[in-house]
Amino acid sequence: MRFLILLLLSASAGLAQPQKALTISPSVLKAALDKAPDALHSQELHDQVLRLFGKQSLLKGKPSTRIEGETVAWAIMDMKPAQVVRGDGTVIGMMTPLGDDGLQVLVQTFPNFTEFAYHIVTDGAPRVAGTVHIENYTYTADSDLQKGVPVGKLVKFEWKQSRLFPETAREVTVYIPAQYKPGAEACLMVWQDGGRHVDPKGSMRASVVFDNLIHQKQMPVTIGVFVDPGRKLKQKAGEKAGNRSFEYDSLGDLYVRFLLEEILPEVQKRCAVKFRPEPEARAIAGGSSGGICSFTAAWERPDQFHKVLCWVGTFVDIRGGNAYPYLLRVTERKPIRVYLLDGSNDLDNKYGNWPLANRMMEASLKYMNYDFRMDWTQCFHGSKGMAPTLPEALKWLWRDVK
């Protein structure tokens, strides 16, 4: 019992409000189950597990996993013995009862970059189904808040007056570095799906990385314009932006015109900032459909954007993006620098194979002697794989701009 108490105390260490009810972590729960037999009869452990998963969610039979790094915890409320089974029928393990009200748990550690479907089965029948997705990374110090580093300002506004994408609304977040001097011109970097990438507490932490690299003079003083995709005006709050694929996946110059004619002038007016006009001082970034959108913007207007940051780019057959590897080979080389990142666990579906499409982009850029860099990882589709690599990618992208 003493071991369990020490584990629970370690789980609570560092909480700002110790009087609040504590919630255990999957790793501490695993240690308690592995090494402290008395834990199975501990009311404190039982209550913390209920808080971790949510009693009401368990009672409603919602998918019940909590993942910490590579450690996965499952829970269920059922008086009958339960086990967790992979989608292929392999039994992962029997669940351990905690208390006498039917709460059962299982905690196991898996290799990084693991993904599988599962069922929680009781009395031979599946009760709960879901998917485990493990993708764990370590950030460098450049992605963390650093003492003594000036913090840039974030300014947000909503844009509902688009001529090029009528009947849409979107949020725009502008990052203004602390080093920016009013009236001066600064470099520019535009981000698609911007709101979640600029969030200093999000996975990408772009504003924090900007703060650190600008302070270190590893990138120039740069204003970030983080643009969200358009929502239809009739959409409900929280729904996926209905205009995203049309804006991002379509080829042609419509989206880059939207930036140049609407968003960037509005940012300069609202925030009293100026952008350097030379294309070498301008970059554009995005992932997935936002990635191909960024490439398209520079491809169509290399006189405006010379630098592209693209991860898990959607160069597949959704709105014609699969043509780019071939267009690259038959079009005179354009003065753009391209950073690409993809992973062996990226998507493979009816629209195409993302790793293969990015391999083809890599081969075509190499064949045409572009200034490019391709980083291959084990990442899945999404932004998790790009996030810890962002500082290095930005250093490479801005390496010759002062």
Image (tube, grey):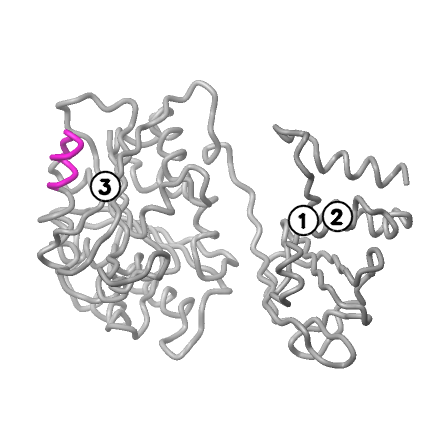
Residue range of the region highlighted in magenta in the rendering: 265-276
Q: What secondary structure is found at the residue carrying circle 1?
A: helix
From this view, report whether residue 348 is shown above or below residue 196: below
C-alpha span from label 3 to label 2 = 43 Å
Q: Quadrant of residue 223?
A: top left
**Which disc is residue 207 wearing?**
none
> Are discs 1 and 2 less than 8 Å apart at CB?
yes
**Is residue 269 within the magenta segment?**
yes
**Residue for badge 3:** 157
Kindly indicate the quadrant of the structure image that contains residue 318. Answer: bottom left
Give the class, few, some or many, for how many residues have Cα within 10 Å of label 2's Cα (few <14, many ≥20).
some
Q: Residue 321's x, y, as percent?
A: 26, 69
Q: Amino acid at mark 3?
A: Phe
Residue ID for mark 2 = 47
Which is nearer the N-term, disc 3 or disc 2? Answer: 2
Observer-nearest residue: 90 or 173? Answer: 173
Please give the name of the residue rendered at 43% of the width and 50% of the height, measured from the top-left corner. Answer: 386
Question: Which residue is painted at 16% across and 30% down in the image?
Answer: 273
User: Is 314 positioned to the left or the right of 336 in the image?
Assistant: right
| Count of numbered circles on the image | 3
Rendered location of residue 236, percent (x, y): 32, 60
Q: Secondary structure at mark 3?
A: strand
Q: CA distance from mark 1 to mark 2?
A: 6 Å
Residue at the extreme top: 148
Residue type beneath disc 2: Asp
Mark 1 = which residue? 51
Question: Residue at point 29% right, 38% down?
Answer: 398
Spot occupied by residue 125 in the image (x, y as percentages of width and height): 72, 80
Q: Measured from the top left, where is residue 10 in percent x and y?
A: 75, 35
Image quadrant for the N terminus? top right
Asked if the residues shown at circle 1 and circle 3 are in contact, with their CB atoms under 8 angstroms apart, the answer is no
> Which amino acid type is marked by label 1?
Arg
